[in-house]
Amino acid sequence: MQFETLLYDVKDGVATICLNRPDRMNSIGGTMKEDLEKAFLEYARQDDDVRVIVFTGTGERAFCAGADIKERANRVLSLPEYHKQQKYTHDLLRAIEVIEKPVIAAINGVALGGGLEMALCADIRIAASHAKMGLPEAKLGVLPAAGGTQRLPRLVGVGWAKHLTLTAQHIDAEKALSIGLVTEVMPIEDLMPRAMELAQQMANTAPLSLRFIKQAIDLGMQTGIDAGLEYERFAAAVTATSEDRKEGMRAFVEKRKPKFIGR
């Protein structure tokens, strides 16, 4: 697939979506939002051969440095125009966040502003040891407006979310690990092999199970435990009557690798 700002590849059930503006530290500009919409929501989501998505950036300097400030510095929008533009951004990132397939963000360098906000939409975040992360918008007279004020506190807690956004500071990968912003840190040369290893582990499991586990956790975090348990019972009933459940049980008894079909 050819994109102006992305690289897209599918292999062994894993789609890799790579931000590709290395000369601008993979910043958000040009056709990137439109390219992301097509890559995630048209290609990866609708391709039955894709079980898992790995999201990363080109090179070793940046996952994504955020908005392309040089591109936006002289752009003036009216309040209605800005609201409309930001609604598109919110809808896009929300669609990526709730996509039925697991998403792994491999943070290969700086992830700042909108770059970190995109990474927050992934189900799992792992980082290279030299990566830096932060939401520095307050230094520019704005605020994290691509979901950062909502997703970050849900992930790391209100205290750390306020600490990071109100000070506009950058943190290193080890600090990100300690507060739960990422789950693993490793040398850059090990980052993509580890991301692909995790992706392959998921791709070898039942697609329906992945879908409903993800949805049960996400919905449960937005509601009370009783409603969450009700959805868990529904999800369990769907998977318990699926072809993949039968195949998984047969494969276990026969001591072989299951062949899941997503039904």
Image: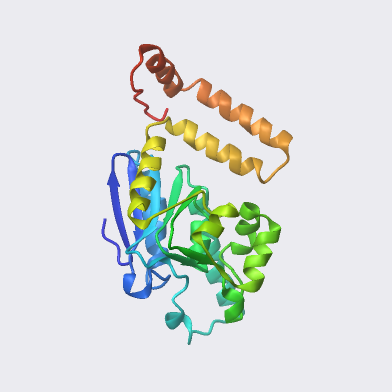
**Residue 153 or residue 9, whichever sits in front:** 153
Quadrant, the N terminus: bottom left
Q: Which quadrant would residue 237 be assigned to in this image?
A: top right
| Color encoding of the figure | rainbow
Position in image of residue 260 (x %, y %): 37, 27
Can residue 164 be seen? yes
Position in image of residue 91 (x %, y %): 53, 59
Is 252 above or below relative to 171? above
Is 234 above or below relative to 7? above
Q: Residue at x 64, y 73 (%)?
A: 167
Q: Which quadrant would residue 189 be assigned to in this image?
A: bottom left
Quadrant, the C terminus: top left
Q: Residue at x 28, y 51 (%)?
A: 9
Picture mark count: 0
Position in image of residue 20 (x %, y %): 33, 65
Can residue 92 be seen? no
Is 126 above or below relative to 81? above
**Residue 134 or residue 213, whichever sits in front:** 134
Is 92 above or below relative to 256? below
Q: Residue at x 61, y 81 (%)?
A: 141
Position in image of residue 232 (x %, y %): 62, 31
Name the residue at the bottom extreme.
74
Residue 215 left/right relative to 202: right
Q: Residue at x 68, y 65 (%)?
A: 162
Q: Which quadrant would residue 68 be assigned to in this image?
A: bottom left
